[in-house]
Image: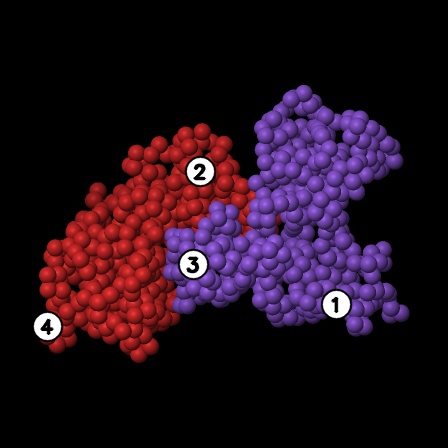
Chain colours: A red, B purple
Amino acid sequence: MKNNRFVVIGGDAAGMSAASLVKRRRPDLEIEAFEMGDYTSYGACGMPYYISGLVPELEDLVVVSPQEFREKRGITVHMRHRVEKIIPAEKKIEVLELDSGRRKEVLYDELLIATGAAPVVPPGIDVNLPGVFVLRGLPDAEVIKQEALKTSGQEAVVVGTGYIGMEMAEALAEAGLKVKVIGRRPQVMPAFEEEIAAKVQKELIGRDVEVYTGAEAQQVKRSDSGRLQVTLSGGRTLTADLIVIGTGVRPRSELAAEAGLELGVKKAIKVDHRQRTSVEHIWSAGDCAEAYHRLLGKNTYIPLALTANRQGRIVGDNIAGTPAEFPGILGTTICKVFDLTVARTGLGLKEAQSEGLDVTKVEVNARSRPHYYPGGSEIKTILMVERGNRKLWGAQMVGLDGVAHRINTWAAAIYAGLSLEDIHAMDLAYAPPYSPVWDPVLIAAEIALKQVK
Amino acid sequence: MKNNRFVVIGGDAAGMSAASLVKRRRPDLEIEAFEMGDYTSYGACGMPYYISGLVPELEDLVVVSPQEFREKRGITVHMRHRVEKIIPAEKKIEVLELDSGRRKEVLYDELLIATGAAPVVPPGIDVNLPGVFVLRGLPDAEVIKQEALKTSGQEAVVVGTGYIGMEMAEALAEAGLKVKVIGRRPQVMPAFEEEIAAKVQKELIGRDVEVYTGAEAQQVKRSDSGRLQVTLSGGRTLTADLIVIGTGVRPRSELAAEAGLELGVKKAIKVDHRQRTSVEHIWSAGDCAEAYHRLLGKNTYIPLALTANRQGRIVGDNIAGTPAEFPGILGTTICKVFDLTVARTGLGLKEAQSEGLDVTKVEVNARSRPHYYPGGSEIKTILMVERGNRKLWGAQMVGLDGVAHRINTWAAAIYAGLSLEDIHAMDLAYAPPYSPVWDPVLIAAEIALKQVK
């Protein structure tokens, strides 16, 4: 390969995974990374646990610091440098050094765009209003935590009932605030079937979190008393001392679009199996890019940490000279909501139906441990099963005990394309502290076999 | 099918699973079961947790009582009836009613032998000596518990370091006794690789359990002081107030052998894929029978609860008129030893090598959760990988956190015959409370891919 300068835009996991891998395998290459913020490669998913107080120091979330990248991995990371423009015809980028205001041009042989995602803010909310926060990165986590702990007895409104919304609701409640969550959809956690969502809503209410579904925040203003007021569609008004926006993210793909790169699903940067964009010598990985979905057989946009890491490595492999393809996702996710664990893999019912599949869902409740062993409780499993061939397209679980790694049994089974008969025939581990003789996975497969013809 | 009387020998899970399934599907058949003990269908694996005090009542372990079988499932279970003889030529059995001493003959059209397993007692130990106990069934659990709680500060010797030995060591220690375990092999838990066993031994010692490996109990006697004395090979003597034998089990196959049925591996009753024995109209299931091993491609003897239940159902299906085959086991087991979880699936190194496979083992240590999230700890994974084709034959794990259901991800992957590349490509669930971005399963697959060529 004749490339000798690999330039990475973005200092998060996707970009830095690629950079690290390339440096290890091709120490002869010059690698430069540009990050507009103050942090590289950190566990963004850990931020709620810093806010809740579970993780004591913000720095604990940093996986590899810019210094470590420089000193231990030999990768130059330019912090607080914003890439302003990509000029593919000249294989160069224009970079703004934020602190000095200086601009420079950097030539690349291969370029990785790993600009990540940006939070989506609902139209009615002014994020510049004091007390309104968006969780973009570590500095926001710090500010939110400071604000949350300012005085006791504060009230918080969390806008959004997806993963971030749920985790922030828990975090703020654990930090001692009275929490209200609002979501546009008729149910919380719209990525899950309604039976699962109902369990989550019950858990929230049981933890004294007020839940407003089917409601949009139409206006936020500061009242005469100095507190924030959120007006919901329908007219109801909620009072809050702070408001946290967690309504999801969109790909940061403007830079790529301006450079003429094709965008794909939800305006994510269009990529092929090797993470190549539509423009030669430009790659993309992570939350700004599409992700290939194994079950859909096409690209989708589900920004997740493992996907970002893996795509970064795929880019690294390709640039280091080993052709590699992203194996694709199954849409596996997991989320802790207070004591509940909520997890899914594969397609949801509507997702499957919108692909034209004749899929039905099977709901199965089974104990996580034998009836006599303490600590067990009910796991609700929902399986998405195609009529006729009884192919399994998705699995979702919710429960207080034993959900976390059981979802991966489903993920493995779906990855491998196992039939329900095969899943039911699997030799899973049994001992009373962990599982009943017939694991909830086996029971769910059995009931699905009986119910779906 | 013209059979009209289905007779079951044995009231445990294997026998009663078959009986229940047949009754549901063929209510026209007459079903009679004979159990020599006082209990049907109970969670034998739960007995240590009754002894430890975790499970308050012995009756809690009973899954379905004889009354329930009779009244709710319409199955006649004759308790305290011992089958003395099977006469296949006349399709009849001879039964001894233990309480009255009466004998009777019962005709069958189809017969299931589900006589289970019997504990193996090392030659040097007299089980009739007061204070020496064997854990055969619920009444033994009761007696051991009474004895353990008789006075405080008692010492116990547990003979055997397999699953039962480990669970009994924990149970007796939790019940407040000072525990010593002795085992013939150079390591505890011989079903596991030595690196895993070393972790278990460390846990035992950390819990103040004395461990004597490579030692046989050569003699047990009551000393002049009235306490028990166990003389080990090598001459050392251990003092104890009670001794519990947990050195494994053998199939209860004498009745079958006397009736002319072929025995197979370790004198277990030889069965085919449909659980038919070598004699027509006689079936076998559970701990007295062989079990087909998917990876070995032949029958083996690994008595486990899920296998017994599943084989019972296979017999039930076949008798009810739906031809069914036992799908086979992978040798998946799991065991709690104090705070440690130890689990395996597939073959161990020696097991694979003795099949002529060129297998090597890969040891991988990885955190169960992100470094910043509380409650995480190291999981040690050992993979058995064939050189050349890098086929995965087995996986073993040990750790304080997150082992339990992760082993099932390996079990599913091995069941499906996934390659290490595929396992590494799986989309597993990530959230900080449960897993690092790269799950220990993915990390183990990655390292195995690097190490094995």
Please give the chain letter of the residue carrying mark 2: A
Q: Are marks 2 and 1 on the same chain?
A: no
In terms of secondary structure, where does tag 4 sit? strand
The residue under the point 32% across, 67% down is: A21
Please give the chain letter of the residue carrying mark 1: B
Q: Measured along the vertical axis of the image, is residue A439 above or below residue B392?
A: above
Residue B78 in percent (x, y) is at: 76, 33
Q: Residues within 10 Å of mark 3 (few under 14, many from 20)?
A: many
Q: Are marks 3 and 2 in contact (CB under 8 Å)?
A: no
Q: Nearer the viewer, mark 3 or mark 4?
A: 3
Q: Quadrant of the N terminus of chain B?
A: top right
In terms of secondary structure, where does tag 2 sit? strand
Residue A293 shown left or right of residue B293 in the figure: left
Residue A341 shown left or right of residue B174 in the figure: left
Q: Which residue is mark 1?
A: B215
Name the kind of residue labelled 2 in the image: Glu
Q: Is residue B395 visible?
A: no
Q: Nearer the viewer, mark 3 or mark 2?
A: 3
Q: Which residue is mark 4?
A: A103
Residue A123 shown left or right of residue B322 in the figure: left
Image quadrant in which you'd find residue A303: bottom left
For residue B442, which numbered disc appears in the image? Answer: 3
Name the kind of residue labelled 1 in the image: Ala
